[in-house]
Image (tube, grey):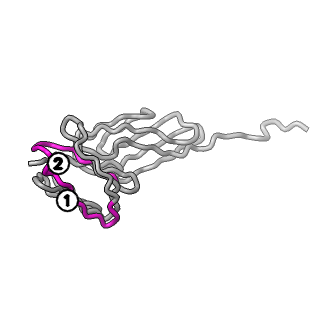
Amino acid sequence: ELKTDYITVSNLPPTANFSGNPTSGFFPLMVNFTDLTSGAVNQWRWYFGDGGTSIVQDPAHTYTNSGNYTVSLKAIGPGGSDSIAKVNYITVLVGIEELNTDIMKVYPNPCSEYLMIDSKESVQSIAMADIIGNIVKDELIQCPAPCNYKINMTDLHQGIYFCRITMEDGRMVLIKILKK
């Protein structure tokens, strides 16, 4: 027996996903986004949270103002579409300021002798670079939560430094420090 058009095979909708790098830093901050969507996709619609959009698969976007930004991706394929939104995914910092969030406080800024880190989460390491990118401190501190850590700044010259604090889960916090 022959049955014409008896079985129909259709494409499944995609499952939207993405990553961005870096997810935090000082403005202007350029973030490279990578599409990690599974399934067949032929259109991408990015919404960067600051009014910017893109239809490129792996776009780069520059954030020009400080704040926290929710990034969304809608992936469209022959089998349908799917969307994902990552709330407060991008954090853009401005200038030289104390970092004070619900999770972490870094102070005083500007500093002279010591820079204090108070974190509700465990801190794995701290790295400090000068204005031209030379690493001047790289400490594996493994400070359990709640972490209260003092960085000795007396051996550094006056100037601007970039401090990278790596959390136990691998997330990074970046802050610009002025040593006076």
Taking the view exactly as shown, the residue that stands out farthest to the bottom is 146
Label 1: how many residues lie within 10 Å, few (<14), some (14-19) or many (20+)?
some
Q: Amino acid at mark 2?
A: Ile
Residue located 23% across and 39% down the image: 28
Q: Residue 94: percent from the left, percent from the top? A: 19, 46
Q: Which residue is mark 1?
A: 116
Q: Nearer the viewer, residue 98 or 39?
A: 98
Q: Secondary structure at mark 2?
A: strand
Q: Amino acid at mark 1?
A: Met
Residue located 25% across and 40% down the image: 135
**Residue 92 seen from this side:** no
Residue located 51% across and 39% down the image: 76
Q: In the rendered view of the protein, which quadrant contains the N terminus?
A: top right
Asked where in the image residue 106 lies, by quadrant, the reply is bottom left
Q: Residue 31: percent from the left, percent from the top? A: 33, 39
Mark 2–mark 1 CB contact (< 8 Å): no
Above or below residue 59? Residue 95 is below
Residue 151 colored in magenta in the image: yes
Above or below residue 147? Residue 12 is above
Q: Residue 23: percent from the left, percent from the top? A: 34, 46
The chief SS type of the magenta part is: strand
Q: Residue 2: percent from the left, percent from the top? A: 88, 36
Q: Nearer the viewer, residue 87 or 81?
A: 87
Asked where in the image residue 34 lies, by quadrant, the reply is top left
Q: Which residue is mark 2?
A: 177
Label 2: how many residues lie within 10 Å, few (<14), some (14-19) or many (20+)?
many
**Residue 99 appears left or right of 157:** right
In magenta, the rendered stretch is 143-166
